[in-house]
Structures are given as structure tokens and as C-alpha cells.
Amino acid sequence: MRGFWFILTCQMAAWPQGLED
């Protein structure tokens, strides 16, 4: 499940950047 949390965290952190860009 480590990969799941890793990807989830990456996407959560990338969301604001994607919306602003």
C-alpha cells in the first residue's frame, strides 16, 4: 500500500499547481 499513499500524496500536492498553471 506504500505505492498507493505515495501516488495519492503526489497527486494531492500537484492539484494546486495544476489548477494555478
Image: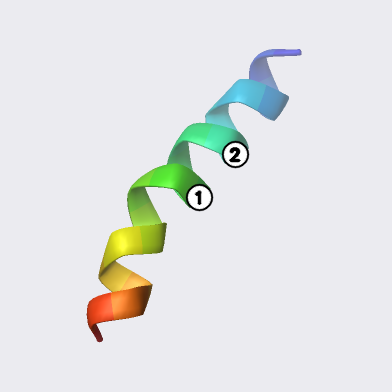
Which structural element holds mark 2? Answer: helix
Amino acid under disc 1: Gln
Left or right: residue 16 versus residue 12 is left
How far is disc 2 from disc 1 in space, using C-alphas?
6 Å
Badge number at residue 7? 2
Where's the C terminus, which quadrant? Answer: bottom left
In this rendering, is residue 14 above or below 3?
Answer: below
Q: Position of residue 5 (x, y in %)?
A: 61, 23
Residue shown at the point (36%, 75%) measured from the top left: 18
Relative to 19, is 10 above or below? Answer: above
Task: Name the residue rendered at 34%, 47% in the picture.
Answer: 13
Relative to 14, 11 lies left or right: right
Task: Name the element at disc 1.
Answer: helix
Residues marked 2 and 1 touching at CB (< 8 Å): yes
Residue 21 shows which numbered tag?
A: none
Neighbourhood count class around disc 2 (C-alpha, 10 Å): few under 14, some 14–19, many 20 upward: few
Callout 1: few (<14), some (14-19), or many (20+) C-alpha neighbours within 10 Å?
few
Which of the 4 quarters of the picture holds residue 10? Answer: top left
Left/right placement of residue 10 relative to residue 18 reads right
Residue 16 x, y percent position in the rendering = 30, 62
Q: Quadrant of the N terminus?
A: top right
- Looking at the picture, the colour scheme in use is rainbow
Residue 19: x percent and y percent? 34, 77
Q: Residue furthest top?
A: 1
Q: Name the foreground residue: 1 vs 13.
A: 13
Location of residue 12 with respect to 17 vertically, above or below = above
User: What residue is at 27 percent from the left and 68 percent from the top?
Assistant: 17
Residue at the limit of the structure toward the bottom, as seen here: 21
Callout 2 amino acid? Ile
Q: Which mark is residue 11?
A: 1
